[in-house]
Image: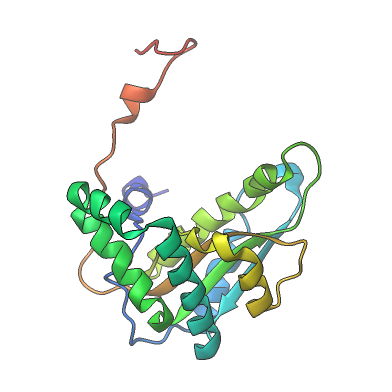
Amino acid sequence: MDLATVDKLLTTTRSVRQRLDLTRPVEPDVIQQCLDIATQAPTGGNICRYHFVVVTDPAKRRGVADLYREAFAQRFPPQLLEDIRQRQPRDVASWEYLAAHLHEVPVHILSCVAPVGGANPRAVALSYILPATWSLMLALRARGLGSAWTSVHLRYEQEMATLLGIPEDIQQAVLLPVAYYKGEDFKPATRVPARERTYWDTWEQTR
């Protein structure tokens, strides 16, 4: 493998909000190709529990956006949002932009998962869909498309299910707004170095 290309893909796949191109159509065949790639992600027991709802209809995209905005307002009431803005002004501006323009994003992809049994089934179910969702973001990025990982809408999961005809037993996981991105390339994000939080054999034992 070309490690430089692979490493660049892995370190520069960002949640894209303000740089989504709201005017450029996204080809359905490209979306389907990315979904086919995403389903090669690891899945527990090799059981294919994944489902994806691709929303392109303008009226339904507006319905998704309305639910998202309502959930966003509840998740981030004004005072909390202002408090966060003092520490993370660029992040808050990006969140607000996506909430305001979500209905304009040409494609929404909602990743979902079939139910599982056992203890804490909702949490376990996520292990079947989150790897595929991340692979989907990578496949999109490799083709010049941006996406943003968000789950704010889950406060209105039932209403979203009604809007999109999702069966009652299907669990929603992540909403990805998808569009071609504008501007130049992306850079690696600022992160706590892994070596500072990597322990060998015993907690807090570093190399």
Q: Position of residue 51 (x, y in %)?
A: 68, 65
Q: Nearer the viewer, residue 7 or 152?
A: 152
Compared to 105, does 190 lie above or below? above
Residue 175 appears in view: yes
Residue drawn at (48%, 77%), measured in percent from left and top? 66
Q: Quadrant of the C terminus?
A: top left
Residue drawn at (35%, 47%), measured in percent from left and top? 7
Compared to 160, does 172 lie above or below? above
Quarter location, residue 55: bottom right
* Residue at the limit of the structure toward the right, as seen here: 117
Compared to 135, does 167 lie above or below? below
Q: Position of residue 153 (x, y in %)?
A: 52, 64
* Model colouring: rainbow
Residue 186 appears in view: no
Q: Position of residue 149 (x, y in %)?
A: 44, 59
Q: Nearer the viewer, residue 78 or 24?
A: 78
